[in-house]
Image (cartoon, grey):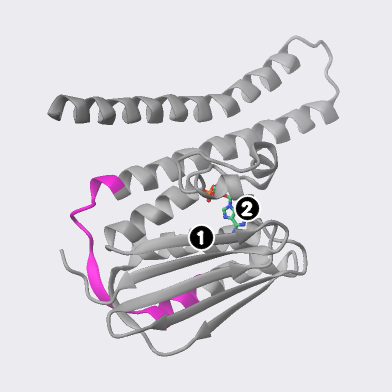
Amino acid sequence: KMLGRMKVLDDSRNEFVSNVSHELKTPLTSMKVLADSLLIQEDVPAELYKEFMGDLSEEIERENKIINDLLSLVKMDKTANTLNIKSENMNVLIEKILKRLRPIAATRNIELVLESFRPVTAEIDEMKMSLALTNLVENAIKYNKDDGWVHVSLNADHKNCYIEVADSGIGIPEGAIEHVFERFYRVDKSHSREIGGTGLGLAIARSAVVMHRGAVRVYSQVDAGTTFTVRIPLTYVS
Ligand code: ADP
């Protein structure tokens, strides 16, 4: 039985490593093609050089994003028992996150509002919880439509804190919903690539929420929008 479990762990680790390698190779392949095609040509016009260098720079940025997300994910795993728990004002924390993301939402005229039902204090690791909530709100903006909205709400009862991130975006097809938290999973690989997604954001978010002994759920309807709900206990029990 023990050996069986080790085998399962080993298989999922192998799958993860093979996914990581694949994801990291894709931008590298593009960079190689771009560089080589410039190298084999004689007398390349300056404009073409510029264009290719721009493309190269984009691929480097993408590689960088994947590596950063991977590092966040690994950090979540490693420090699972070393959370830096402090009592935090959730209203302030969420308002800070929204303030940072508002300029991005504004470029597509997306309305980003917070509805606070009450003052909420919770025992959390601020960095990790911020990363989780940032990823959810970022997605709500990324997978939205121009002139759309993102509504974030914060509430609590005597035991738990509830955060909801609802958007008026493109939605998630029914068959994809159960997969969105998987590492590297993207509903639309090409579209998501354009938007710049790595497929790791929700895996990171869930990891952080679960470390706080909370839960995250998703409800969605194609072309109507998506709602992510997060529940976190107000007091952390290790
Ligand atoms: P990505 O880096 O691609 O955004 P995530 O792990 O954050 O990766 O999300 C996984 C996939 O789930 C995304 O590629 C997207 O297809 C889908 N998704 C996530 N959030 C939303 C949302 N708010 N609306 C629609 N689709 C979403």
Name the residue that disc number 1 marks.
Answer: 218
Q: Where is residue 221 in the image (x, y as percent from the top left)?
A: 65, 59
Q: Is residue 200 magenta?
A: no
- Residue at (34, 30) in percent of width and height: 12
Q: In this view, does 108 lie above or below 98?
A: above
- Residue at (16, 24) in percent of width and height: 3
**Residue situated in front as seen by the camera: 197 or 184:** 184
Indicate the quadrant containing the N terminus: top left, top right, bottom left or bottom right. Answer: top left
Label 2 beta carbon within 8 A of ligand 1: yes
Name the residue that disc number 2 marks.
Answer: 172
- Residue at (45, 38) in percent of width and height: 67
Label 1 Cα crowd, 10 Å radius (few <14 / some 14-19 / many 20+): some
Amino acid carrying mark 1 in the image: Val
Label 1 beta carbon within 8 A of ligand 1: yes
- Secondary structure under the numbered disc 2 in the rendered image: loop
Indicate the quadrant containing the C terminus: top left, top right, bottom left or bottom right. Answer: bottom left
Q: Where is residue 149 in the image (x, y as percent from the top left)?
A: 68, 72
Q: What stretch is highlighted in magenta?
A: 77-97
**Residue situated in front as seen by the camera: 97 or 120:** 120
Q: Position of residue 52 (x, y in %)?
A: 74, 28
Amino acid carrying mark 2 in the image: Ile
Task: Determine whether, in the image, residue 11 is placed left or right of residue 175.
Answer: left
In this view, the residue farthest toward the bottom is: 118
Label 2 Cα crowd, 10 Å radius (few <14 / some 14-19 / many 20+): many
**Residue situated in front as seen by the camera: 55 or 79:** 79
Disc 1, disc 2: CB below 8 Å?
A: yes
Say which quarter of the image contains residue 104: bottom right
Using the numbered discs, state the Cα–Cα distance from disc 1 to disc 2 in whole angstroms. 10 Å
Q: Is residue 53 above or below residue 93?
A: above
